[in-house]
Image (cartoon, rainbow, N blue to C red):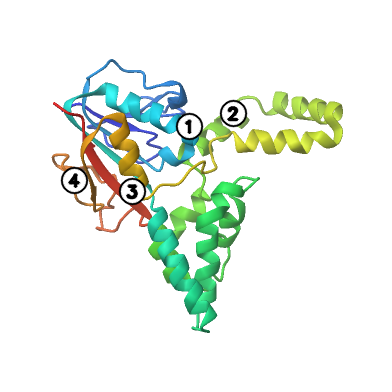
Amino acid sequence: MEMLNLGCGKCFHSAWVNVDFSGRPPDVLGCDLRKGIPFASSGFQVVYHSHLLEHFPRELADGFLEECYRVLAAGGVLRVVVPDLERIVTLYLERLNAALGGQPGAEKDYDWLMLELYDQTVRSESGGAMKRYLERADIPNRAFVASRMGSLQQARRGGQIPEHQRRRKLSTSRRLPRFKTWRERLTKGILGAEYEILKEGRFRRSGEVHLWMYDRFSLARLLRSVGFVDIRRCEAGESAIPNWDVYRLDVESDGSVRKPDSLFMECRKPG
C-alpha cells in the first residue's frame, strides 16, 4: 500500500513515503510543498498531513489540497490534522466565564488559551510568547497545558515551531554561519532602522506562523470544494487507513494523543 506523509518532521514511519521541507535521507525526502507535491498522479492510496495546512495562506490551501487529490488513487484516503479552532474557542469561552466568576485557576487557563488563539498568528520572533510560557519552571496550570499540548517536555524542546522550520534554520546556520553574519551586518548597515522591518518580514514568511485556522465546518467545506467525498471527523486513534494503530502518527506508544489540541478529519477521492 503506497502511503504519503507530508510535512512529517520527526513523526514518520518507514512504511510510508515521508516528505518534509528539509530532507533527512534516507528516511525523509526534502521538498518545498508550497510548490506542489513531487509525485505522479494517482500514485498513493493514502495521503496524511498533520499541523501543516494552517501554515499555508488561506488562498493557497485549496491548491495544496488539490495536489493531495491529484496524487491520490481513486478511492484513496486523505487524513488531515489541524489545530481545532472550535475546541479552542469553546474552552476560551468556558475559562473566560469562569475567570469572570472568580473560579480559582481559571485566569491562568484563560491566559494560556489566549496564547493558543493568537500567539502563533501574531508573533514576530521564533517561539513567541508561547515558548516563553512553556520555558517557565513554575507553570501554574501544568495539567491543563499538558491536556492541550501533550508532552510538555516535547513542547518545550520544539518551542511550538514547526519541525521542518527548526531543521531548516539549524542546517542553514551550520552551513553558512560566517557568510550569514557578514550579510546581515551589511544589510543592517544599508537599511538602518528599516532592517527590523525586513527581519520581521522574513520571519513572517518563514513558515512558523499560523496563517489560517479551521473548524469541522470550514475544513469539511474546503475538502468538499476540492472534490473529496465521505468527509468525516474522527478520533486520533480512529481511521479508515488499514493498520492505523501500528504507525503511531497521531497516538503515542503509551496511548496518549500526540497533539491533543487537534481536529482529525478524513475523506476519500471518489472512485
**Callout count:** 4
Foreground disc of the pair 2, 4 = 4
Measuring from the top left, give residue 193's x and y in whole percent: 84, 37
Numbered disc 2: secondary structure: helix
Measuring from the top left, give residue 221's x and y in whole percent: 32, 41
Against 261, residue 8 (above or below) is: above
Which amino acid lies under the numbered mark 2 shown in the image of this protein? Thr
Foreground disc of the pair 3, 4 = 3
For the residues bearing labels 3 and 4, Cβ distance under 8 angstroms: no
Residue situated in front as seen by the camera: 86 or 40:
86
Q: Residues within 10 Å of mark 4 (few under 14, many from 20)?
A: some
Looking at the image, is mark 2 or mark 1 earlier in the sequence? 1
Numbered disc 1: secondary structure: helix
Looking at the image, is mark 2 or mark 4 earlier in the sequence? 2
What residue sits right under mark 4 in the picture? 239
Measuring from the top left, give residue 148's x and y in whole percent: 41, 61
Numbered disc 4: secondary structure: loop
Foreground disc of the pair 4, 1 = 1
What residue sits right under mark 3 in the picture? 217
What residue sits right under mark 1 in the picture? 59
For the residues bearing labels 2 and 1, Cβ distance under 8 angstroms: no
Looking at the image, is mark 3 or mark 2 earlier in the sequence? 2
Which amino acid lies under the numbered mark 1 shown in the image of this protein? Glu
Foreground disc of the pair 3, 2 = 3
Which amino acid lies under the numbered mark 4 shown in the image of this protein? Ser
What residue sits right under mark 2 in the picture? 172
